[in-house]
Image: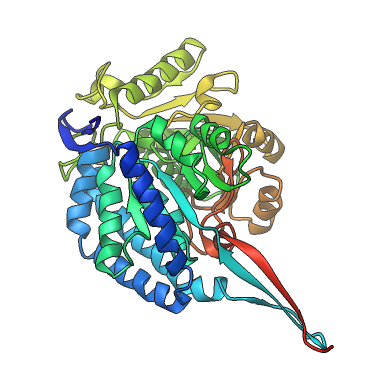
Amino acid sequence: MSKLQCISPIDGSVYVERDLASNPEIRAALAKAEQAQKAWKNTPVAERVAIGRRAIAAFAAKEAQLAEELCWMMGRPIRYAAGEIRGFVERASYMVDIAEQALADIQLPDKPGFIRFIRREPLGVALVIAPWNYPYLTAVNAVLPALLAGNAVLLKHSAQTPLCAERMVAAFAEAGLPDGVFQYLHLSHADTEQLIKAPAIAHVAFTGSVAGGAMVERAAAGRFISAGLELGGKDPAYVRADADLDHAVATSIDGAFFNSGQSCCGIERIYVHEALYDAFVEQAVALVKQYQLGRSDDPATTLGPLVRSEAADFVREQVAEAVAQGAIAHIDPDSFALDRPGSAYLAPQVLTKVHHGMRVMTEESFGPLVGIQKVANDEEALALINDSEFGLTAALFSRDVASALALADRIEAGTVFLNRCDYLDPALAWTGVKHSGRGCTLSGVGYEHLTRAKSFHFKTQL
């Protein structure tokens, strides 16, 4: 039987090993989900909500254990790892709080002699394919609302974070969720693709690369099922001339380097008005030099390793190419002892004299790297912000709310922030445009993507 191995980026050791599901096991899980969903969809929403609340409590009670596992599986510094558990609780609690209202029948104005309403029906069995970089936060976006909407869920997690799938399923089992409604499968890429093609799968929620999203669309083609795709990003920040400089530096740099830059909505390119540019660069470089690159299990570490050495080498190649094209690198990698070619430990880097002829300003980096480019005005910044195949989020820094709103309205992105970045408010729809994907999670709108409308049109007077 084929094995899954989670190699810890901390020291290269095998942290978790699991058998991959066999074809009979996959078929059995799918049949079990189909059968369980038939009863689950008839369970009152209030009862589903109560189970959801108990599952959240069971999950939160294991915060310390979950944080340590997260640290070792994907390299998040231990000082920050528990934040994802708390973020999970925040998002899940909000989606539970709004479930009954979001899933209620849509009532229409009275029409004499008729009863008319629209009911939100569950889709059936949903397959959630979750990534390693924010393994709990990305998964909960789709898993919990899908369950509350009356669907059964099969969760396939990244091979880098297999325990996350197991821990989530265990929390719901502890909460009393009926057997079969929520299951996990450790799968190969080939078996994942075949599962998408299974007739019983009615919805796919995928978070990952553009290439992975294209695979989902190919596998689902011709079946007319719904798919939510959160894909890549090259998220920009624009610091206007009237911005609070200190706040803009601190916030955008944190948005660029938190989680070692391995965030779908992390800041990867910064445009700064020429009036603030020199001061911004000076403060940003000074701040980045303060990061402590080290083992994720060391409480002093503020910048952990990338998930794999290949990912770190990819970022090194981007930097070397940009420097060869005229960019200036402001951080000496030798000042970070653990940084060396072929290692997952990578020094942070700030580049200036960059332009859109460089891959570093157009191609997703997914590492501790940011390019800073000078602009003369809003129009130049807007053109550069929109000059991307991606459109997940964008961040503006300004004291002028009205001007920022007018500018935000012209930005091609699923979310536009003002004076903040890299945060998902569960009350807002989480979505992307262009190659950042399609579909929606979170907020009341997210429930619409996990249900189908069924209209009731009764003539009561004959």
Residue in the foreground of this view, choosing between 203 and 462? 462
| Above or below, 97 relative to 131 | below
What x and y, as percent, mark residue 333? 29, 21
Which quadrant holds the N terminus? top left
Q: Is residue 265 visible?
A: no
Q: Residue at x 26, y 17 (%)?
A: 342
- In the rendered structure, the answer to whether residue 130 lies left or right of residue 458 reads left
Colour approach in the figure: rainbow
Q: Is residue 215 visible?
A: yes
What x and y, as percent, mark residue 171? 27, 62
What x and y, as percent, mark residue 443? 53, 63
Which quadrant holds the C terminus? bottom right
- In the rendered structure, the answer to whether residue 387 lies left or right of residue 337 reads right
Q: Residue at x 39, y 44 (%)?
A: 254
| Above or below, 427 relative to 184 | below
Q: Residue at x 36, y 58 (%)?
A: 182
What x and y, as percent, mark residue 352? 49, 25
| Above or below, 117 relative to 400 | below
Displayed quadrant of residue 195: top left
Which residue sits furthest top?
324
- In the rendered structure, the answer to whether residue 395 lies left or right of residue 316 reads right
Numbered label tally: 0
